[in-house]
Image (tube, rainbow, N blue to C red):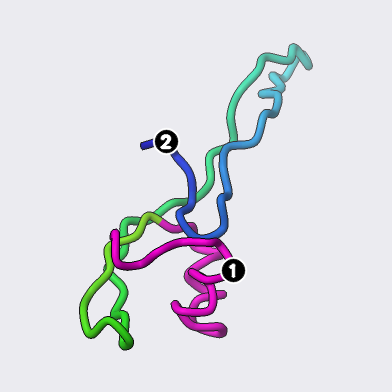
Amino acid sequence: MGRKCDLTGKEANNAFAISHSHRRTKRLQHANLQEKRIWWPQGKRWVKLRISTKAIKTLQKKGLEVMAREAGIDLRKY
């Protein structure tokens, strides 16, 4: 299981770490992922997902069922 948001697909971004002398070395900017238990009302149970904090905010607005459908995720497997 890689570092990837289950609902949005957000992953790490390639970037440079720049020192004081402006020497550039490669680094990764990881997504802010959280293990979260979310209540799924249609399934009447908790679903454990690894989602980004941005997805948590969007989840409060749209709802779990809508976001899972958009991402093409079957919640019965989680």
> Is label 1 or label 2 in front?
1
- Whether residue 11 is situated above or below residue 68 in the rendered picture: above
In front of the other: 68 or 48: 68
- Numbered tag placed on residue 70 in the rendering: 1
Can you give x and y, in whole percent of width and height, for residue 21 in the image? Answer: 76, 13
Q: Earlier in the sequence, mark 1 or mark 2?
A: 2
Q: Which residues are magenta?
A: 51-78
Residue at the (32%, 86%) spot, across then down: 42
Q: Main secondary structure of the magenta part?
A: helix
Question: Residue 75: within the magenta?
Answer: yes
* Circle 2 residue: 2
Residue at the (37%, 55%) spot, across then down: 50
Give the residue type at disc 1.
Glu
Give the residue type at disc 2.
Gly
Residue lying farthest to the right in this orientation: 22
Question: Can you tell which quarter of the image residue 26 is in?
Answer: top right
In front of the other: 55 or 6: 6
